[in-house]
Image (spheres, rainbow, N blue to C red):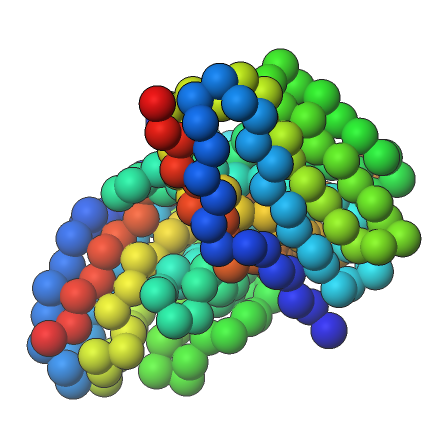
């Protein structure tokens, strides 16, 4: 158990809908990262928040948005869903390991199925 | 640019050593990581190596880094059936927290 929690575990929804995925980082970790794992794109970094502020952005679609709240939990909002958005969405939080880099701890993921 | 590549499959007999290879393109990589993903589970950090190191050993795991060739390998000694999983290498660069993952190598261990 990494200490990172994600809800829900599974989500099935229809095209065009909007969903919210939730993540709670490990106690004391200020950074939250979101990743998408799909069969055709592999594991891709989406976005990072640090202490409530957006810190880095990856291959995140404009239909997707995220935020981090004062209690440090984060939500990833996916809207106008398409079949291709079906994937595993992982959240991670991090602790420094020196040299300006961080060890990331991953949650169990939310499996999103768009039908 | 950032690109991390791995072979897709590896099959080994129980008790043998497994070697999983990874190549990356970003010469500014500072840390390189190996993660394990078991079926239906999240990613578990196995080990990492700083870019100024050549080798790191951690129990059954040995990481070798050839920075000149941008080649990283993970050797698992005495491979067990419980090691069957997908193994991802990943890189990060100085002060960039995001991880760039490889395509993953599916390791199958047979008796």
In the image, residue A62 sits, relative to residue B87, either above or below, namely below
The answer to whether residue A114 of the structure is visible from this angle is: yes
Depth check: give the residue in front, B79 or A108.
B79
Residue at x-position 68% and y-position 26%: B62
Of residue A49 and residue A111, the one placed in the foreground of this image is A111
For the C terminus of chain A, the quadrant is bottom left
Quarter of the image where one finds residue A86: bottom left
Residue A98, how many percent across, how many down?
77, 35
Q: Residue at the spot x=31%, y=58% of the render?
A: A88
Q: Is residue A85 left or right of residue A30?
A: left
Q: Position of residue B87 (x, y in %)?
A: 49, 43
Image-based side of A114 in relation to B26, left or right: left
Q: Position of residue A10 (x, y in %)?
A: 16, 53
Which residue is nearer to you in this view: A22 or A107? A107
Q: Is residue A111 left or right of residue B103?
A: left
Q: Residue furthest top?
A: B59
Q: Is residue A29 visible?
A: no
Q: Residue at x 46, y 60 (%)?
A: A43
Q: Quadrant of residue B49?
A: top right
């Amino acid at each position: 158990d990494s200490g990172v929690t994600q809800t829900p575990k599974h989500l099935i929804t229809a095209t065009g809908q909007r969903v919210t995925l939730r993540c709670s980082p490990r106690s004391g970790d200020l950074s939250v990262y979101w990743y998408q794992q799909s069969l055709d794109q592999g594991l891709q970094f989406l976005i990072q928040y640090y202490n409530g502020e957006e810190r880095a952005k990856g291959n995140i679609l404009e239909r997707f948005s995220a935020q981090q709240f004062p209690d440090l939990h984060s939500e990833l909002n996916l809207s106008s869903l398409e079949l291709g958005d079906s994937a595993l969405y992982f959240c991670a939080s991090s602790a420094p390991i020196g040299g300006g880099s961080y060890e990331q701890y991953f949650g169990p993921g939310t499996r999103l199925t768009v039908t | 640019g950032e690109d991390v590549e791995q072979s897709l499959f590896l099959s080994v007999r129980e008790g043998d050593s497994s070697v999983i290879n990874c190549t990356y393109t970003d010469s500014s990589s500072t840390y390189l990581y190996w993660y394990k993903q078991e079926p239906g589970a999240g990613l578990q950090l196995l080990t990492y190596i700083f870019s100024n190191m050549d080798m790191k050993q951690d129990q059954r795991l040995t990481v070798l880094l050839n920075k000149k060739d941008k080649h990283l390998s993970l050797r698992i000694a005495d491979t067990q059936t419980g090691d069957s999983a997908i193994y991802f290498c990943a890189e990060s660069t100085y002060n960039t927290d995001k991880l760039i993952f490889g395509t993953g190598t599916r390791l199958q261990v047979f008796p």
